[in-house]
Image (cartoon, rainbow, N blue to C red):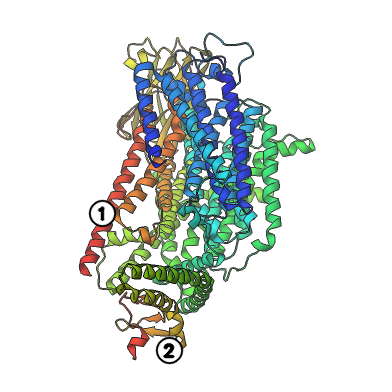
């Protein structure tokens, strides 16, 4: 199929050029028309095949089945509003008080939406973890059969690490640290879960590392 | 000759209808819980487009093989025409232009379906279904009302009629296809809108999806309308560019709603509000495109543009009924979901300004619509009123200025809420610029030939009439002042943005030069600054429109050797010559066998400087010896155009009647179009996702946009090449426009002009990408 994708037009073009040189423009038009008709027939054929359920679902199609949720769209709108706010503050179109008021409001909204999205993902994540663990066990058992046991130890830790990564934001909230924290370089206030400073871009040291 | 070609052609049109119906059904099934059928629907959409292409190729074959059994071929071609002319005369008449319309639509369908791959999974089925209904409608039109493959009852003729010489001019044909591109482009946003309404996915998703499609349609609506003005200006020979003809009006109506939409969508993308409004605007824009086509083709209102009256109007009426019923029904059905969840927080906000501007744009649209339809409406109560250009000019001046003023003010406000101090700060410089301009205009205007106040006749009796008269006479002053205001606003926006960037950079300890900051600013906020560039184009157009207030129009009769003074020009009539035949004619003029040309040569001197010669003419075509065409001759500059038309020339005494016009500032309209195109293309430039950053993605995007736009323009203009024929050099153009004859210009325009645009786009893409790569490298080395 993938070869036909470029070979067929190329072939048509060559035939059309030959027809044009030796037999005149009428045959060129006919060649192109014939090619168009063949294209239509093949497209219709694949369409009917897909209709009858005989064609395979490609990865891209399967991936696209998971559509964006409304929350994701709202999140995008809120992030866009935040971007606007930053811009308007930088060109002086909004007063500082208003900026802080709106920024706080939109940040809270964004945080809520991100949490909702995270919760929505929890189910899927759990499944992925289970699947991953299952496969790792399978791989591990296969490798022990082959007499390679060294990798076995490392395999369960991968899923643990995944779980840890997922939990870390909540951990940070539980510690009861202040709602924002300052960047050690430029003293800008950043969200707790930020890894880099939003003002100067320097990496932020996490509170856990700050006060061990 | 291929015996069954006409039947095959008709069969293919049936096949288009069937394939569209099939795709429609499969797409609906895919939308109603059988997602795996989507692939079948997508392939169905492609094959429907393929069938349209096949039909077009079949008709081209009929043209090149001179199959005069087909009425359309016999009507629009003859055996003498070259292949290129034959192929492109496919789109000359009503039946063929419907097929052309379908081809453009299927181009949009293919592009849209390909673009949708893997995106907007839930909207997709209904988008395809809606587009298929529109394709199906045009297939039905071709089958039942205007079949391009219909055979003549009398059988094949020995030769065809050839092209009507009156159609053989470049501008006449160049603007409708561009408009088609814009008109047809409005189908895609409409399809998304219907799809969002059906699936209840009424959040921002569809609005974001539609954005660029609508901008693309807006771009072509603008190009089509302005090219239409150029045509009227250069070919109709009455000295103006916009006659408020019903068909011209119909073409500009969707432009108003489309521009309203590109503004109000920005609000919905940020806030959950104006949803009903946006849905309404999209449906209205699409409806107006169909309505405009209906006005052109059904011939219900007399107009110079109208095709011959045919039964086609009835089908359009049904289709408009379907569109109205569907969109209104869906809107009412989804009203609870569409309800606004936000509200405008302050009057001093950009939202409020946009809403006001939307109302003004819609008001302008409604005024034009009602005034255009008024002759028809007034028949309802037995009156037969005519609405002429003066009526439009009186009212559209003030309405246009309201839109213009709001356009200037909106950027000064921030989103949500703007504090009093920042408004004061923002308005300071533009108001100052405006005040300076008013003073300058009052002091120097009259001596330069642009007085701020012009006398106007009273149009209506009574108080309202007096107000309109007063406002009318101050319009030039107000427009020029507002133009200064607008330009100052745009410049200030750029300056503020650049300053903010540089301040942020210096805080980081980097140094950004003004130029780099400007480029990055536009790159990071393409839509915002692209929009400002579009505004600048509109300012330029408004300046051009205002020029009409200072027009000088004269009519005179002259004998050879006579002088005439108009504006700052001294004109000397040298005499007339008939080409071919006269020894003074150029070789091209001598060898013309299609027509005889009667030129009147006039020498032009401006302020003591000899500028060259203009030669307005009358052309007598062999096929239509009784109806000579009037050929304008012009001398253009940014300051003003000298526009000359010859009425009658006495063969014995060589006494000629002339119309001379001095039209100030008209060229700024065409300049404005170029600026507007630049701005829209800046906004259209694809936004690159973070995952895709890299030099190549920029090259690809730049080349994609440039090539896409250039290709679209080229496709849209393809038919015009059939009509672009060599014409004698009309004006021995002076220093203002180096001697390119109009005909060569016309020929060069579609091929090399847009090829150049493509290459320029590619070059731009490469430069941006190189800059980007250098910066990335610098960052990497710093790390």
Is B71 left or right of A145, judged from the image as shown?
A: right
Which disc number belongs to residue A177? 2
Left or right: A124, with A86 as reference point: right
Taking the image as shown, residue B394 lies to the left or right of residue B324, namely left
**Rendered residue at 49%/61% (across/down):** B409
Q: What is the chain letter for disc 1?
A: B
Return the x and y of residue B754 as percentages of the image width and height: 37, 37
Is the same chain shared between marks 2 and 1? no
Q: Is residue A163 in view?
A: yes
Crowding near pointer 2: few (<14 within 10 Å), some, many (20+)? few
Relative height, residue A167 to residue B22 (above, below): below
The residue positioned farthest toward the left in the image shown: B781
In percent of width and height, residue B101 lies at: 54, 34
**Image-quadrant location for residue B133:** top right
**Residue at the image position 38 percent from the left and 35 percent from the top:** B568
Give the number of the disc on residue A96.
none
Q: Is residue A173 above or below residue B518?
A: below
**Local crowd size for mark 1, using a 10 Å CA cut-off: few (<14), some (14–19), many (≥20):** some
Provide the residue designation for mark 1: B770
- Helix or strand or loop: what does disc 2 sit on? loop
Is residue A2 or residue A204 the one in the foreground?
A2
Q: Which one is nearer the viewer's eye here, B345 or B185? A: B185
Q: Where is residue B234 shown, x and y percent of the image?
A: 46, 31
Q: CA distance from mark 2 to mark 1?
A: 45 Å
B733 relative to B339 in the view: left or right: left
Give coordinates of residue B443: x percent, y percent: 41, 53
Number of numbered labels in the structure image: 2
Indicate the quadrant containing the N terminus of chain A: top left, top right, bottom left or bottom right. Answer: top left
Quarter of the image for the C terminus of chain A: give it: bottom left
Q: Nearer the viewer, mark 2 or mark 1?
A: 2
Q: For residue B257, say whether it is visible.
A: no
Q: Residue at x 63, y 25 (%)?
A: B308
């Amino acid at each position: 199929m993938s070869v036909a994708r470029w070979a067929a037009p190329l072939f048509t073009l060559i035939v059309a050029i030959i027809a044009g040189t030796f037999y005149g423009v009428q045959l060129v038009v006919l060649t192109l028309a014939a090619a168009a008709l063949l294209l239509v027939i093949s497209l219709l054929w694949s369409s009917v095949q897909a209709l009858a359920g005989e064609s395979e679902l490609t990865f891209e199609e399967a991936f696209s089945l998971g559509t964006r949720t409304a929350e994701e769209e709202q999140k995008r709108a809120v992030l866009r509003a935040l971007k606007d706010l930053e811009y308007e503050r930088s060109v002086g179109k909004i007063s500082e008080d208003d900026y802080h008021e709106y920024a706080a409001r939109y940040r809270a909204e964004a945080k809520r939406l991100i949490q909702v999205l995270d919760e929505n993902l929890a189910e899927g994540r759990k499944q992925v973890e289970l699947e991953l663990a299952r496969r790792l066990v399978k791989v591990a058992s296969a490798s022990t059969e082959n007499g390679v046991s060294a990798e076995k130890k490392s395999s369960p830790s991968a899923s643990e690490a995944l779980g840890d990564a997922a939990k870390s934001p909540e951990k940070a909230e539980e510690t009861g640290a202040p709602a924002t924290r300052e960047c050690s370089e430029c003293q800008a206030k950043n969200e707790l879960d930020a890894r880099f400073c939003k003002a100067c871009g320097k990496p932020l040291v996490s509170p856990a590392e700050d006060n061990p | 000759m291929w015996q069954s070609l006409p039947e095959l052609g008709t069969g293919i049109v049936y096949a288009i209808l069937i394939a569209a119906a099939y795709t429609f059904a499969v797409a609906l099934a895919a939308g109603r819980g059988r997602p795996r059928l989507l692939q079948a629907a997508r392939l169905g959409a492609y094959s429907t487009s393929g069938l349209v292409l096949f039909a077009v190729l079949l008709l081209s074959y009929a043209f090149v093989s001179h199959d005069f059994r087909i009425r359309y071929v016999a009507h629009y071609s003859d055996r003498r025409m070259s292949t290129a002319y034959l192929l492109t005369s496919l789109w000359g008449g009503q039946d063929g232009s419907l097929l052309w319309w379908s081809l453009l639509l299927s181009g949009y369908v293919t592009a849209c379906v390909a673009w949708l791959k893997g995106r907007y999974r839930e909207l997709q089925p209904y988008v395809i279904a809606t587009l298929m209904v529109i394709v199906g409608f045009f297939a039905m039109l071709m089958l039942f009302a205007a079949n391009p493959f219909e055979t003549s009852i009398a059988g094949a003729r020995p030769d065809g009629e050839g092209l009507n010489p009156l159609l053989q001019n470049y501008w006449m044909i160049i603007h409708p296809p561009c408009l088609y591109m814009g008109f047809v482009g409005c189908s895609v946003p409409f399809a998304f809108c219907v799809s969002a309404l059906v699936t209840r996915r009424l959040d921002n998703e569809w609005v974001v999806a539609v954005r660029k499609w609508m901008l693309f349609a807006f771009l072509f609506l603008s190009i089509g309308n302005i090219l239409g003005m150029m045509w009227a200006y250069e070919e109709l020979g009455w000295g103006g560019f916009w006659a408020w003809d019903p068909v011209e009006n119909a073409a500009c109506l969707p432009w108003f709603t489309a521009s309203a939409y590109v503004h109000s969508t920005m609000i919905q993308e940020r806030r959950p509000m104006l949803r009903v409004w946006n849905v309404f605007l999209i449906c209205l824009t699409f409806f107006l495109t169909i309505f405009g086509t209906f006005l052109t083709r059904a011939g219900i209102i007399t107009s110079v543009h109208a095709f011959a009256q045919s039964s086609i109007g009835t089908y359009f009426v049904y289709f408009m009924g379907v569109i109205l019923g569907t969109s209104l029904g869906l809107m009412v059905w989804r009203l609870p979901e569409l309800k606004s969840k936000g509200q405008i927080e302050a009057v001093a906000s950009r939202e409020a300004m946009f809403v006001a501007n939307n109302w003004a744009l819609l008001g302008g649209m409604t005024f034009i619509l009602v005034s255009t339809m008024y002759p028809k409406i007034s028949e309802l109560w037995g009156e037969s009123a005519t609405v002429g250009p003066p009526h439009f000019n009186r009212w559209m001046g003030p309405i246009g200025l309201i839109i213009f003023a709001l356009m200037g003010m909106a950027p000064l406000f921030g989103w949500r809420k703007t504090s009093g101090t920042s408004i004061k700060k923002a308005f300071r410089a533009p108001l100052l610029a405006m005040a300076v301009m008013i003073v300058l205009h009052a002091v120097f205007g009259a001596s330069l030939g642009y007085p701020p106040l012009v006398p106007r006749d009273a149009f209506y009796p009574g108080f309202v009439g007096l107000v309109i008269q007063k406002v009318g006479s101050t319009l030039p002053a107000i427009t020029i002042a507002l133009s200064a205001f607008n330009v100052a606003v745009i410049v200030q926006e750029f300056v503020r943005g650049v300053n903010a960037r540089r301040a942020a950079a210096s805080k980081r300890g980097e140094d950004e030069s003004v130029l780099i900051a400007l480029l990055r600013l536009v790159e990071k906020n393409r839509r915002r600054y692209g929009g400002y560039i579009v505004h600048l184009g509109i300012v330029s157009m408004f300046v051009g429109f205002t020029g009409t207030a200072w027009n000088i129009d004269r009519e005179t009769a002259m004998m050879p050797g006579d002088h005439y003074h108009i504006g700052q020009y001294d004109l000397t009539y040298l005499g007339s010559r008939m080409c071919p035949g006269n020894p003074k004619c150029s070789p091209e003029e001598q060898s013309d066998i299609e027509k005889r040309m009667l030129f009147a040569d006039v020498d032009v001197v401006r302020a003591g400087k000899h500028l060259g010669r203009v030669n307005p003419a009358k052309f007598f075509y062999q096929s239509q010896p009784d109806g000579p065409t009037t050929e304008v001759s012009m001398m253009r500059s940014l300051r003003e155009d000298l526009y000359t038309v010859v009425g009658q020339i006495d063969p014995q005494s060589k006494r000629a009647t002339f119309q001379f016009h001095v039209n100030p500032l008209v060229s700024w309209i065409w300049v404005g179009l170029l600026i507007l195109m630049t701005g829209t293309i800046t906004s259209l430039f694809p936004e690159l996702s973070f995952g895709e950053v890299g030099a190549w993605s920029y090259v690809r995007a730049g080349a994609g946009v440039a090539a896409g736009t250039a290709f679209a323009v080229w496709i849209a203009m393809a038919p015009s090449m059939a009509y672009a024929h060599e014409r004698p050099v009309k004006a021995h153009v002076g220093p203002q426009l180096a001697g390119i004859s109009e005909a060569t210009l016309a020929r060069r325009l579609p091929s090399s002009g847009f090829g150049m645009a493509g290459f320029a786009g590619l070059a731009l893409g490469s430069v941006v990408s190189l800059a980007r790569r250098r910066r990335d490298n610098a960052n990497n080395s710093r790390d």
